[in-house]
Image: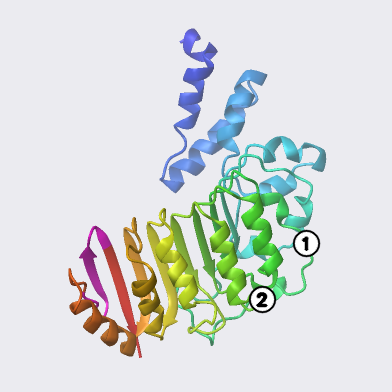
Amino acid sequence: MDQVLQSPELLTLIFDMINQDDIELLVRHKSSLAPLARVNSRWRDLVYPTLWAAPDVEALAKIKSKRRQQYASHIRTPNFSGPGVCADPTLHTLFANLQFPRIKSLVLGHYGPDTSNILDPIIFRPLAIHKDWSISTSQYFQETLEDLRLLSWDSICTKSFFVQIAERCPRLKSVHFWAIGTQLRPDDLLDFFRASGHLENIGLCLGPEPKSALITGDLLLHFSRMTKLKDLLVNNELSQPEFFWAIKKQNVNPFQNLKQVSLRATSTVMLTESIRYEKSTPPVHTHDQADDTHSGCVARVTSSA
């Protein structure tokens, strides 16, 4: 037992055991880790990376400013999506001078009143509390960041904001943008994806209308050329068949490694594309609310009126 208690490798394995999917166990085990961090400096150095990997961001705010960096250095997944947290702009102000060198995943904003993930212009309301904020979120955009979710926080999602993300986060693998877009032009969004060459997962539900002007043929064509893309979700309504024609005409081998795709299209687009696909070899069929498997790719195409 003494050997175990003196071995950093074995202690780390034991402490890492608390990283479980069961939320109740996670909370219970984390509460037991805190006293262990007080045993000695060695245990503290081993416990902190686990204890502070995915903390309640409000807990970081409660720590004295001179000591916050010590804990921020261990944070991998700060989550600001909770209703109480995202309504408190002072948190970002308190963290403005911190560095997050290990950050892997970041959520800013929240889904708002709609939990269906389907954009409804009636309920598309960028969070009012965010409208006049003038704060920095650049401290979170480190080169280690791999997963980014921007939810309903439309006022910060400008061209310069996305340029900054692309420049500072070259390892991004997954992005999810929900209920944003009124501050952007189509080329702004396209430029961001062109600069983010390692993306494997893309989810879009842009506002303020289901038929977002940001979803263009050029954007879909670029998606079709992304060789690392595995999962694509476009929850905006696709109403122009020519979007797909451009892909067929200009890319002989589209979506090379795509494993799953989910799209929303008008009945006209679905009918047109079904006919055209049936003439191709091998055939690919699109149906209302259907899961189709073709070349290892699961496709869900949902019809809109």
Label ID, residue 173: none
The residue drawn where x is 77% and y is 73% is 132
**Which element is circle 2 on?**
loop
Q: Which-is-in-front pick, marks 1 and 2?
A: 2
* Residue underneath mark 2: 183
Residue visible at 51% across and 13% down? 7
Q: Position of residue 96 (x, y in %)?
A: 77, 51
How crowded pointer 2 is (Cα within 10 Å; few <14, some 14-19, many 20+) is rated as few
Q: Residue at x 65, y 53 (%)?
A: 167
Q: Residues within 10 Å of mark 1 (few under 14, many from 20)?
A: few
Chain part drawn in magenta: 285-297
Q: Where is residue 17 drawn, in percent x and y?
A: 44, 32
Whole-percent x, y for residue 101 in the image:
66, 40
Identify the mark nearer the N-term, 1 or 2.
1
Q: Residue at x 32, y 78 (%)?
A: 302
Q: Quadrant of residue 25?
A: top left
Residue for badge 1: 135
141 or 95, which lies in front? Answer: 141
As drawn, 211 above or below 49:
below
Mark 1: amino acid: Ile
Closest to the observer: 281 or 56?
Answer: 281
